Structures are given as C-alpha cells and as structure tokens.
Image: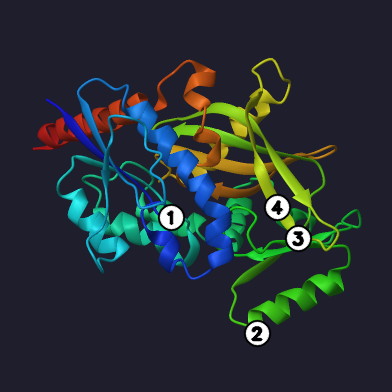
Amino acid sequence: MTTRVFVYEYLSGGGWSDYGDDAAADELLPLGLSMRDAMVADLMRVADCSVSAAACEPGNTLPAGAMPLRPLANESAFDFVARQSVLHDVVWLVAPETDGLLAKFQRTVGNARWLGCSAGAIELTAGKKATLAHLAAHGVPTPLAFAHAPEIERWVVKPDDGAGGVATHVHTRHANALEDQARRTHAGATLTLEPWIEGEALSLSLLCTEQNAEMLSINRQCISIDAHGSLSFDGVSVDALGRSDPRWQPLAALAMQVARAIPGLRGFAGIDLVWHPRHGAVVIEVNPRVTCAYVGLSAALGRNLAAELLAGRFRSEAQQRELARAVA
C-alpha cells in the first residue's frame, strides 16, 4: 500500500506573498526551500511512498519525481493545506512559529495526518520567553539564570516568536537594549530581551518519540553581528561535533531533559544553545519542527531520517490501536 505524503513549506508554498514582512520573507525563503527539498529528496527514497509538495516559488527546484502542487486562485495557505491534507495520508509541514502560524497549520491538518510535534508543544515553544521560563522551571540552564550576572556585557532584543535571526539586535549597553525594546514594542512588535550568552553557538537535532529523544547530531551555527549590532544567521555546519567530543554525552542528556520538560515533542525537533566556556550548555530556544540542520543530515548520518520518521509515526499508531483493544 502506497503512503501519500504532502510536504508543505510555508514560504515556498506561497506564504512569502502574505507573510507581512518582505525583508524577513526574502531572508527565510532560501532556507525554507533547502529544507523542503531535503525532506522531499529523503521521502523519494522511501519504498511505497508517493510525494507531493507545494511549489509556488519562481523556478521550481523540487527533486525529480515529486509532484508540484499550487493553491487555487485566491486560496489561502490554510485552505490549500486543508484541501491537500484530506487527499494525502501524511502531511509533513514546516512554517515559522511567528503569529502562531505553525500551530494553526497543525490544527488545520489535525492529529490523524500530522507528522510532527503536538499542538501543545508547538504553542509552548512558539514564545521564546515562555519557553525559557518553562525550561528553567524544569532545571534546564537558560539565559534567565544570567539576568543579574556581573559577567554579562551584551544583551539581545529579538522577536518573541521570530525565526532565524530576523530583527535580532545585540547591544553592548543594557539601557540601549531597553530603549530598543520599548521603541519596537511601541510600534507593535512582541519582543524579548535576554542576556547575550558568550560562547559557541550550537544546535541539537533530535528524533523524538513518546518514550525517547535521540540526539542525532550536534551542529555548529554560523552567526554574525555587524557593526550596528544586527544579527545574521549565515547557515549551519551539520554534524560538526562527533560522538568522540566530550560534550556529546552531556548534550544528549540535556536533549532528554528538554524532551521530558516538553512531552509533546515528536518527530524532528531542534534545540538552539550556546556552549559557555565556564557554565557549559545554555538553551536559547526549542524548534518544534524541521530546522536548517535537516539539510544534508541523512547523508551525514548514513540514515534516511524521513523513512524513520514515517516508520515511527505508524508504529506509534499501531501501539495506540493495540492499547485501545486491550482496554476494550
């Protein structure tokens, strides 16, 4: 029996035209395309799997064999996804958490076809401030622990539900950070202000199930800050730190700690962190979806992660049916 999978990445699926921030959309679209095409390429190598994907960007880059789909004239992104979801067995979707987009898509698709994190996990991790408070309450190291540390010399102001490094500014004076936050808040932005944690910017790629969170890789994030304090995300070096690195075991334990604190993490998820030279890992945010680190990861690990995600989803469904029969 063939499994019909619909891959939808928000910006390349037509969302760039109504994202509401042209500069952010231009910055995020290439990242979205690379994720979509990596997901599709992995799925194309899964036996008994047919793959369709939203492809509305100029110049379709979809891997050969995948069926490109486009919304109807004047059809909203949510209506398009809703229409396609009932025509497919599984929907694998990537969207920014901004303005609740990812959570709304999850509710649009529904649990029966959704491949990814639960609505509750998405809604919690959509807010950076709420995520850090939740994790700190579960003993996870976060920047909140550094709020009054004398060693802090820089502060960062960023969208509370933003993606990438969009609209993120680093300040060398706390007063300037407060002024930046107040000015942009007055203009209608929802922001968070945090101590800037010095150290190596890393991310963890996870494969999450109900019982486990396997750390697939430790990735090195490429981040730059210009003379005006504007931060840019310049890509990621996938699987940069191998299992022989002394940080592997403590970071794998941290991944499990985060997963236990946010039990709705399912499928592929990411954790952004900084490795502080004295304090070790400090979690910055949790991404309840495919991240840029997915691109090239299957090849780096010698595993087809899409196949594993699908297998894990159907195995979980079978277990739930067995439990229901046992209870009955």
Residue 91: percent from left, percent from top = 28, 44
Report whether 301 appears left or right of 284: left
Q: Which residue is mark 4?
A: 232
Q: Which residue is mark 2?
A: 186
Q: CA distance from mark 2 to mark 4?
A: 24 Å
Q: Which residue is mark 1?
A: 11
Mark 2: give few (<14), some (14-19) or many (20+) Cα within 10 Å.
Answer: few
Residue 117 got which mark?
none
Residue furthest toward the bottom? 186
- Front label number (2 vs 3): 3
Q: Which structural element holds mark 2?
A: helix
**Mark 2 or mark 1: whose residue is earlier in sequence:** 1
Residue 228: percent from left, percent from top = 83, 63
Q: Which structural element holds mark 1?
A: loop
Q: Which residue is mark 3?
A: 230
**Mark 1 or mark 4: whose residue is earlier in sequence:** 1
- Which residue occupies the foreground of this view, 45 or 142? 45
